[in-house]
Amino acid sequence: MGLFETYRVAGGEAGMRHFISQFGPTLSLPWTKLMDVPELNEELIEKIVAQSDAQSGMHSIRELERIRDDNLVAIMQGLKLHDWGAGALLKEYEERLYEKAHSGIVASDPDLSETLRLHDSKVRPDWLDYNGHMTESRYLQVFGDTSDAFLNFIGMDENYRKQGFSVYTVETHIRHLREVSGGESLSVETQLLDYDEKRIRIVHEMLHSSSGDVLATGEHMLLHVNTNKGKACPFGKILYEKLAQIWNGHQNLSIPDYAGKGFQELNKK
């Protein structure tokens, strides 16, 4: 976003003319200190306003603010890849959020004959859409955070990842069953549906913490990979043995009737 487009945003809905009328007088002195500049008169102001309208008049101020913010976030994300400047600070902040999200105390010896409860959450105000309900991307965030908690539970911690191994999500199926309002407390229960030497298939059920109503479900296929080679590979011993322990109990749980079924198949009922 260029300098004059930034001025347009500063002028608010009244636009560039309003900005110049408000700040033009304070710019007059520094303007005269520049070399070979025209006089800041009505003719020049009209030209600036017309060119600003031609450049950005198709966008509302709110749209320009959103464009500005999206561009700033994109720049910071780019800097994060290089661990530089504001990007380094963002990286550190996101790592702290990750640690906080997965620092919940889980029983060291939970009952593996039951579904696992590894993650709780709360619907924040900035998670709401224009209908006042939790927007769809946040359902995926809650399920993603729960998958991370599950992976941490089976032993995929930072030390494991530093060895060049991780788990990637390769397929996801989310069902949005009930509306979720701001401030609601959520809990998620996780069931291991199947696994082999390289893959995990799990399902999460998002519950209203007070009523117990099922708000959404998320079924995920996860793949173990060698991150240095970019290829799938067998689980390490610690992960595979933990999965076997969980499966010893979860294989006796009822498989949800929606598991493994797409939208069309469910609608045939």
Image (cartoon, helix red, strand yellow):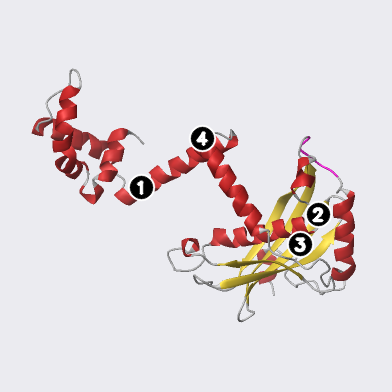
Sequence-first disc among 3 and 4: 4
Task: Give the residue at mark 3.
Answer: 202
Pick the front one: 257 or 95: 95
Dominant secondary structure of the magenta stretch?
loop
Q: Quadrant of the N terminus?
A: top left
Which comes before the other along the chain, label 2 or label 3?
2
Magenta region, residue range: 229-233
Q: Nearer the viewer, residue 60 or 138?
A: 138
Could you tell me how far apart the alpha carbons at marks 3 and 4 are, in whole angstroms? 39 Å
Residue count near mark 3 (Cα–Cα under 10 Å), binned few <14, some 14–19, many ≥20: many
Label 4 sits on residue: 85
Q: Nearer the viewer, residue 249 or 55?
A: 249
Please give the residue where the numbered disc 1 appears in the rendered image. 65
Kind of residue indicated by mark 3: Ile
Q: Secondary structure at mark 4?
A: helix
- Give the position of the C terminus as an image quadrant: bottom right
Mark 1 or 4, nearer chain start? 1
Q: Which mark is residue 155?
A: 2
Label 2 to label 1, Cα distance in Å?
43 Å
